[in-house]
Amino acid sequence: YAREELASQCTGMANLIGVHYLGVATICASWNMRLMNQVMRDTAEGEKTGDPCLISLAITEPGAGTDVEEVELVARAQVSTHARRVEGGYVVNGRKIFISNGHVSKWHMLCAYADLDNPAESMVMLAVKNGTPGFSFGRTEHKMGQKGCPASELIFDDCFISDDLVCFDLNQAKKQKRSMKETTMQVVDYVVSGSRAGVGGFGTGVARGAYEEALKYAAETEVDGKLLINHEWAQCALAEMYKNVAVSRMSYVETNYANGMYGMFKALQFKPVFYYLKYMPAPIIDKFIQPFMNLGLTTWLFRKIMFDWQKAEDYQCTSGWASLSKFTATDAGVRNCQLALELMGQDGLRHDMRTEKHLRDSKLLQIYEGTNQLNRLNLFKCLVGRGYPQAQAFED
């Protein structure tokens, strides 16, 4: 709901905050507890000292965008960020583009590929910190909307990443019961099941912001001798906009429920963990939890629970509902902006009315975190077609 509230005023600012948690979700989805502990403590320390430590996700490439979010599609993508295995780690070469928060983040969760001809079986997830030799920033994109959140180019030129900063790779995946391809899809689904719900919150916020601006305008503006709010056609438009907000909100709330029951947040719902974290003083948590997090046994245990014990229908549920929320709410956001502009006429184009800003901000929501077309296909794969063996998704 916080993302909705922020996006109702400025989607760029909402994304600036929300994308940090996309990076957080990515490292959490690897269930590498030692590295998670290291990066999160950097973030907490930055908050205490007033020097923010944000985390970005670097996955999009010049020749690979939405298709890297589905293992069935990544083989068709033109991935080019190569992670070459060397003694003690990986050497990375390539570029990432449109990376939200790139220039303002200190840690970057990088998705590269050990075999560019077989990316579905060779994804390598690495944690890269600013100042790492061979890593630099390129251009910042000039966007139509969401200007408060920078979109950056990240460049890797013989960038060495040591083994202690490898979140997840084939060597680690061999310890799980599923194949590398299946485990990679689990990692991706853990991330997007949360992030797409968040984008659904953005879309709901944009839809609400446009509705509130249109309602205020209609209540104050006279047309043909009576207030616009008293024209029947305007009342129908405002009712449609209200419906779009309500349905969008219900979709992301339902997705959050699914994530709490079956997804990444399931571990936090375990009663002993919940009450321990809620009531235990921070110094005691530091004393007992930090050493536990750094144990290899802890990572093994969490991966056993979250990878090996997760049922296929569980991640299909979270992924399917996340896609539903994403395209439902973002389409509603764009539609409400269009309805608001139709109701307000040329006044809606004025910057001080803010409606045109909502429209510029909203269009990007239909594109990132998987285009809405892909999310419709993913919903079909996860929730509609799974009961029909003859149904095949992503085949065209």
Image: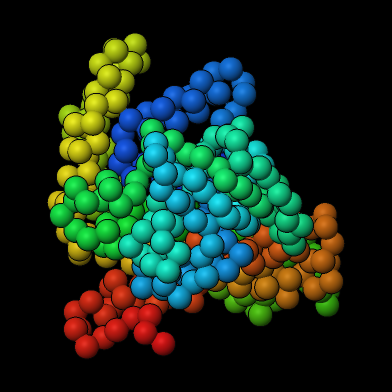
Image location (x, y in percent) of residue 244: 52, 68
Q: Is residue 315 left or right of residue 195?
A: left
The answer to whether residue 298 is seen in the rendering is yes
Q: Which is nearer the eye, 27 or 138?
A: 138
Image location (x, y in percent) of residue 312: 20, 63
Q: Which is nearer the eye, 8 or 137?
A: 137
Looking at the image, which residue is at 49% across and 56% down?
A: 82
Q: Is residue 268 above or below residue 182?
A: above
Image location (x, y in percent) of residue 220: 77, 60
Q: Is residue 130 above or below residue 114?
A: above
Q: Which is nearer the eye, 159 or 240?
A: 159
Looking at the image, which residue is at 77% across and 70% down?
A: 344
Q: Quadrant of the rendered structure where residue 213 is?
A: bottom right
Q: Is residue 395 above or below residue 292?
A: below
Looking at the image, which residue is at 22% across and 44% down?
A: 303
Q: Quadrant of the C terminus?
A: bottom left
Image location (x, y in percent) of residue 160: 51, 40
Q: Quadrant of the rendered structure where residue 185 is?
A: bottom left
Q: How many marks?
A: 0
Q: Is residue 62 left or right of residue 169?
A: right
Looking at the image, which residue is at 19% across and 48% down?
A: 175
The answer to whether residue 219 is seen in the rendering is no
Colour basis? rainbow
